[in-house]
Image (spheres, helix red, strand yellow):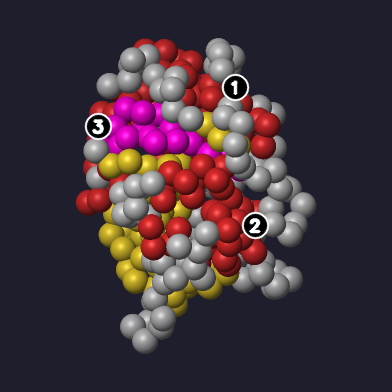
Amino acid sequence: SIPIILDCDPGIDDALAISFAAGSPEIELAGITTVAGNVPLAKTTANALAVAAFAGLPDVPVTPGCAAPLLRPALHADHVHGESGLGGAALPAPRRSAESGHAIDFIIDTVAAARGEITLVATGPLTNIGLALRREPRLASWVRDFVIMGGSASRGNVTPAAEFNIWADPEAAAVVFGAGWSVRMIGLDVTLLARATAAIQERMSSLGSLGSTLLLPALAQYRDADDETGEPPVHDVCAIVSIADPSVFEYTPAQVAVETHGALTSGMTVTDFSASAAHNARVATAINAERFWRTVLSAYGSLPVA
Ligand code: BDR
Ligand code: CA
């Protein structure tokens, strides 16, 4: 199986992503690092601990990182993810606390100790990853792969131009896209097509307490900007699925630059698909949604709480 570090801000869809990682036979979760994003850092960290324990990963280290973006004040999305960050899900309180180190040290040390082996995944604002790259630029060549849920080649969700994870810390995102590695960008172009439809939620209801305690109450109070229908897109799950089952997404090479100055476009991922551009990313441009859900529900079905 493929070892990953998940840098996240749970967050309803982050919680669904952790649960998928826990159940997928293809994924080995080497660690979770947390960042301020959907809710403040103390809550994203507590949520990561609670979800990991609930999903049968009581020993995966959870290491907190940055409590605010590199240059900007922290702006959260509790109107989307609820006061706690997990919508209507009320999980048992975690029995352990987070690791005492800092996320960027955990990321650098873990990747350095297994060069070429670890896939780094980010499903929150890119503050920790940007700072880790500044601290240790060789991180970019030491990872096996680097994947984000974030950005968009078409349109945003916080503003018409910007997706939340990039909008929240555009300077960090600019560092990350400029680090000399190839970013695998799973953005809104495909994640908006990975929706928990009524039929999918029906299937989740047969997953025991995973469905009744976590998945369904979390999704029921998910106020995603693109959820007018009660069928919310599960953005962050896409990033982990792209590692577990590479055939779910199709990619187009592109040059992605992050807008950090625009009065109307701050946080936009300006994406140039032309062949002559200096490609620094592979941008997901198509999803097999049926296969996506088959993979996700199969992993969920193998969890101890399912
Ligand atoms: C992203 O923003 C967050 O609110 C979600 O957790 C996801 O990572 C979608 O734009
Ligand atoms: Ca997230």
Residue occupied by mark 2: 169
Q: Is residue 24 magenta?
A: yes
Q: Is residue 155 magenta?
A: no
Residues under labels 1 and 2: Cα distance? 27 Å
Q: Secondary structure at mark 1?
A: loop
Q: Residue at x 38, y 57 (%)?
A: 142
Highlighted range, magenta: 18-35
Q: Residue at x 55, y 55 (%)?
A: 132
Q: Amino acid at mark 3?
A: Pro
Q: Earlier in the sequence, mark 3 or mark 2?
A: 3
Across and down, in percent, residue 191 comes to 42, 50
Q: Is 268 situated above or below 4? A: below
Q: Residue at x 56, y 42 (%)?
A: 103
Q: Are marks 1 and 2 in contact (CB under 8 Å)?
A: no
Between 221 and 275, the one nearer to me in the picture: 275
Give the class, few, some or many, for how many residues have Cα within 10 Å of label 1's Cα (few <14, many ≥20). few
Q: Is residue 221 visible?
A: no
Q: Secondary structure at mark 2?
A: loop
Quarter of the image where the C terminus is located? top left
Give the class, few, some or many, for how many residues have Cα within 10 Å of label 3's Cα (few <14, many ≥20). some
Judged by depth in the image, the label closer to the viewer, 1 or 2, is: 1
User: Does residue 28 appear to the left or right of 83 in the view shown?
Assistant: left
Does any atom of ligand 2 lie closer than 8 Å to the CB of label 1? no
Instruction: Identify the disc placed on residue 97.
Output: 1
User: Does residue 246 appear to the left or right of 87 in the view shown?
Assistant: left
Quarter of the image where the N terminus is located? top left
